[in-house]
Image (tube, rainbow, N blue to C red):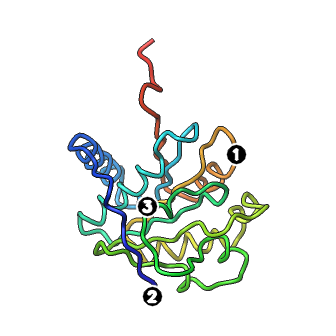
């Protein structure tokens, strides 16, 4: 199995870590059958990928066997959060049938945390994420892991996030700083 190292150059604040623990607890208290959670935002740049990774890390730190699946095939930023050795294949190659499940699953340097990267950009991400092969992958991950976190594209610009969310038990919507007003 391939291994990757999480880039720890950026340190999260105490408040951010506590907010993640609260989010993790809220997800856990939502029901024992909640295993697959998509994370999205309305607009690009609101921090959904950072929250996805931090949430997956939080579950792994709590002893849950966790996988982070990067479903943002169009404009993924997740790979930047890791140090890799060599060529990385991911979700898009798997959904096209070019690689196997074992080839895309990466063990991180954090115990109990695995990841699957988005892979190469493709011209038809919505179709691939709507496929039976994607549904089967989510089902397989649900069987193999205690928690599956799926990072998706923002919902305002493309349908991909909604497609992925329809295959999950729940969805977290990340709002950027100042995005919510008290009006």
Q: Which mark is residue 52?
A: none
Furthest toward the right, the residue is 123
Separation of marks 1 and 2 at Cα, in angstroms: 33 Å
The answer to whether the residue labelled 1 contacts the one labelled 2, judged by CB atoms less than 8 Å apart, is no
Say which residue appears at 59% left-offset and 77% top-offset.
Answer: 89
Q: x%, y% of residue 59? A: 31, 61
- Is label 1 or label 2 in front? 2
Mark 3 lies on residue: 81
In this picture, is 1 found above or below 132?
below
Image quadrant containing the C terminus = top left
13 vs 39, nearest the viewer: 13
Q: Residues within 10 Å of mark 3 (few under 14, many from 20)?
A: some
Q: Secondary structure at mark 2?
A: loop
Q: Secondary structure at mark 3?
A: helix
Separation of marks 2 and 3 at Cα, in angstroms: 19 Å
Separation of marks 3 and 1 at Cα, in angstroms: 23 Å
Say which residue appears at 28% left-offset and 51% top-offset.
Answer: 11
- Residue 49 lies left or right of residue 161; in this view the side is left
- Is label 3 or label 1 in front? 3
Q: Secondary structure at mark 1?
A: loop
Say which residue appears at 71% left-offset and 62% top-offset.
Answer: 130
Mark 2 lies on residue: 1
Furthest toward the left, the residue is 14
Quadrant of the rendered image containing residue 68: bottom left
């Amino acid at each position: 199995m391939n291994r990757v190292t999480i880039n720890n150059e950026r340190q999260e604040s105490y408040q951010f870590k506590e907010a993640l623990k609260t989010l993790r607890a809220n997800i856990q208290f939502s029901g024992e059958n909640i295993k697959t959670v998509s994370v999205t935002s309305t607009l690009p740049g609101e921090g959904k990928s950072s929250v996805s990774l931090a949430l997956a890390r939080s579950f792994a730190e709590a002893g849950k066997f966790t996988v982070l699946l990067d479903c943002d095939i169009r404009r993924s930023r997740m790979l930047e959060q890791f140090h890799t050795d060599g060529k990385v294949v991911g979700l898009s190659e798997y959904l096209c049938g070019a690689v196997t499940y074992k080839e895309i699953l990466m063990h991180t340097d954090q115990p109990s945390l695995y990841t699957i990267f988005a892979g190469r950009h493709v011209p038809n991400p919505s179709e691939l994420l709507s496929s039976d092969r994607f549904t089967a992958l989510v089902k397989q991950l649900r069987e193999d892991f205690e928690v599956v976190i799926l990072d998706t594209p923002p919902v305002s610009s493309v349908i991909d996030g909604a497609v992925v969310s329809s295959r999950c038990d729940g969805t977290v919507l990340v709002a950027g700083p100042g995005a919510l007003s008290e009006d």
